[in-house]
Image (cartoon, grey):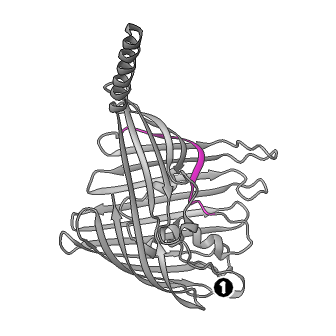
Amino acid sequence: MQHTKSLLAAAALLTLAGAASAQSTEFTWYGRIDLGLESTSDGDVSRIMASNFGSRLGIKGEHKLSADLSAIFQVETGIAPDDTANSKAFANRNSFVGLKTAAAGTVLAGTYDMPLKALEGTSGGLWGQGDLIEILVHGKGSRVAIGNATFQNVHTRKTNVLHYVSPKLANAVVAKLAYSPDEAKTTALNKTVFGASVEYNDGMFNGGVAIENQKDANGAGLAMKGTKFTLGTNLGAFTAGVAMSKLDNSAGRETSNLVVTGTYALNSALVLKASLGKSGESASGANDGIKGMAFEANYALDKQVAVYGFVTKLTNDAAARGTLVASDNFPAITGPNAGKDPRALGVGVRYSF
């Protein structure tokens, strides 16, 4: 009997110790469901689409190791509530483990947005199909536009990455470094990826520069290089920003790209947004430039739920195949369809939790 009591006492102590350990780690479930109804055209065929715009589900946590040192983790997955076939592999979005300190910054390992992708300031922010930065500045449109040419985009959420974020310096400046090694080593070519950025944001003015270099991005030993600049201001009810990039595949294809964005809050609930942009020709006489415009009205029902409407249109030069990319099923422009002008008019509901 005494032995049994001792075992029960030990089990109780282990349970309490486990509970105390669990309580020292703060867990948060979070996510976003963003669905809409669109009237779309790829330039040839018009259709009505029920669309998913980057819905996701995640869990994150922080474990205090000392007054200034914490261990952190996050696991985030893209989901498609309207069509589960489009739900992504587990942990396909930013998912990592890391250490952070107020004095030295944060180090992460896992899957994470490269600094060039993350640099935005007040140059973005449109929802639904309105994100022209992805299409134009990050190169998703020009990648498709020049067909079989060896041109890759630098919209990169990189796997197997080591990522460092500095502490905020002078209460306004943050630097980032990211490195992904060539783990596969399937050839003698070097396929590592390197990225870095420096961003200034004092609350009213923001700006930054980012670079990315993908070694042997096209399989011919040539690097895909990207440079991005942002500049903007936040004046309370009004924000404005510009994002510019130059993307170079080291094989005679290079684009210069620009997106300008403005937002205006009519009141605490209703915000109007607009973006205009273009992607230049990839080579002289290529005739594969893209222009884009997007407009949005966003009405917040409360801090978590908003309804919004948008209209977006791309204008492709005769050899360009840029298409809208925000929804899961928007059709690609391929084959003989170059020069078409895809568009979307839609409404959506975003619930963030």
Secondary-structure class at tag 1: loop
Q: Is residue 161 above or below residue 68?
A: below
Q: Residue at x 36, y 50 (%)?
A: 200
Q: Which residue is labeled 1 in the image?
A: 338
Question: Could you say where residue 316 lies in the image, as x and y percent from the top left?
Answer: 58, 84
Task: Please name the amino acid that badge 1 sits on.
Answer: Ala
Q: Residue at x 40, y 50 (%)?
A: 199
- Whether residue 155 appears in magenta in the rendering, the answer is yes
Quarter of the image containing the N terminus? top left
Q: Nearer the viewer, residue 214 or 312?
A: 312
**Disc 1 packing (10 Å; few <14; some 14–19; many ≥20):** many
Question: Which image quadrant for residue 333?
Answer: bottom right
Q: Nearer the viewer, residue 134 or 255?
A: 134
Horizontally, residue 338 falls left or right of residue 294, namely: right
**Which residue shows up at 32% across the image and 32% down it?**
23
Residue 148 rendering spot, x and y as whole percentages: 74, 72
* Range covered by the magenta-colored residues: 153-167
Quadrant in which the C terminus is drawn: bottom left
Predominant SS of the magenta segment: strand
- The percent position of residue 253, horizontal first and vertical second, equals 68, 68
**Furthest residue toward top:** 2
Camera-side residue: 39 or 181? 39
Position of 244 with respect to 23 (left or right) is right
Q: How many marks?
A: 1
Would you say 306 lies left or right of 132 here? left
- Residue 264 among those drawn in magenta: no
Q: Is residue 124 above or below residue 187?
A: below
**Residue 162 horizontal/vertical position (percent):** 56, 40
Quarter of the view holding residue 247:
bottom right
Of 274 and 19, the residue lying toward us: 19
Q: Is residue 99 above or below residue 270?
A: above
Residue 236 position (above or below residue 144): above
